[in-house]
Image (cartoon, rainbow, N blue to C red):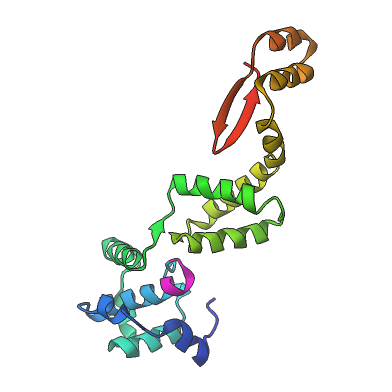
């Protein structure tokens, strides 16, 4: 259930300002009101509402007065389909935001591992850092499930960072000896004879026996 919004919050979060009237201009009726609500919601939260239920009634009435549309017109705004997708694309472009792609999610996972999870192991706090970084990079947050996966991966990879830093300073010969040292007796001789394969991934060096 959406909580009530007081007058101060309405003014701070839902007042149409700057170049926003120009973006809204040219649209009529429910399209005009729906676009204005999407724009203000995205500007404040860095994401779009998941549907009508996330937009407070007080905000709808307040924005409707500003754009000169009856608040009841929001009932005719389609919260799915090509129109709202076009509106989202317009707003992203105007505000300089981009969708978070697979490559972007992987980069954020490594960022968490390198810069956050070394000192913060609380999933909720790591999530807060991630959301702040998404906003700083002007990336639209992905779905809740995907955010959870990025956080979990960041925490998991963060456990390996100290090991990776040490490993990156070792020579191939030393790594080969370490691999052989922990190998089973039956495979130890083979491990000593075959140099480990090393590869670099996002600045890390990992090793495994061939």
Q: Nearer the viewer, residue 4 or 66?
A: 66
Residue 58: x, y in percent?
Answer: 45, 87
At horizontal 74% and vertical 17% (from top left) the residue drawn is 177
At horizontal 40% and vertical 85% (from top left) the residue drawn is 15
Q: What stretch is highlighted in magenta?
A: 42-47
Q: Residue 21's quadrant in the figure? A: bottom left
Placement of 206 over or under 150, stated as above or below: above
Viewport quadrant of the C terminus: top right
Residue 209 included in the magenta stretch of the image: no
How many numbered discs sit on the rendered protein? 0
Residue 195 appears in the rendering? yes
Q: Residue 27's quadrant in the figure? A: bottom left
Residue 146: x, y in percent?
Answer: 52, 51
Residue 209: x, y in percent?
Answer: 65, 18
Residue 6: x, y in percent?
Answer: 53, 90
The secondary structure making up most of the magenta span is helix
Q: Is residue 86 left or right of residue 153?
A: left
Q: In this view, does 3 lie to the left or right of 159?
A: left
Residue 45 included in the magenta stretch of the image: yes
Placement of 72 over or under 131, stated as above or below: below
Q: Which of 205 and 157 is in front in this view?
A: 205
Viewport quadrant of the N terminus: bottom right
At horizontal 39% and vertical 58% (from top left) the residue drawn is 98
Find the residue positioned furthest to the left. 26
Residue 52 appears in the rendering? no
């Amino acid at each position: 259930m959406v909580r009530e919004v007081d007058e101060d919050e309405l003014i701070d979060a839902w007042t149409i300002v700057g170049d926003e009237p120009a973006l809204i201009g040219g649209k009529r009726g429910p399209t005009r009101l729906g676009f204005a609500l999407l724009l203000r919601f995205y500007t404040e939260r860095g994401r779009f509402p998941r549907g009508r239920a996330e937009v407070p009634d007080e905000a709808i009435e307040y924005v409707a007065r500003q754009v000169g549309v009856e608040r009841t017109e929001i009932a005719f705004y389609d919260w799915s389909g090509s129109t709202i997708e076009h509106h989202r694309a317009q707003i992203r472009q105007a505000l300089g935001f981009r969708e978070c792609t697979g490559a972007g999610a992987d980069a954020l996972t490594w960022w968490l591992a390198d810069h956050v999870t070394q000192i913060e192991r609380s999933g909720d706090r790591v999530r807060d850092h991630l959301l702040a970084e998404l906003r700083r990079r002007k990336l639209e947050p992905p779905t809740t499930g995907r955010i959870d996966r990025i956080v979990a991966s960041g925490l998991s990879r963060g456990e390996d960072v100290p090991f990776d830093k040490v490993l990156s300073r070792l020579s191939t010969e030393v790594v080969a000896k370490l691999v052989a040292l922990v190998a089973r007796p039956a495979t130890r001789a083979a491990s000593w004879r075959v140099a480990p394969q090393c590869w670099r991934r996002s600045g890390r060096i990992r090793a495994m026996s061939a």
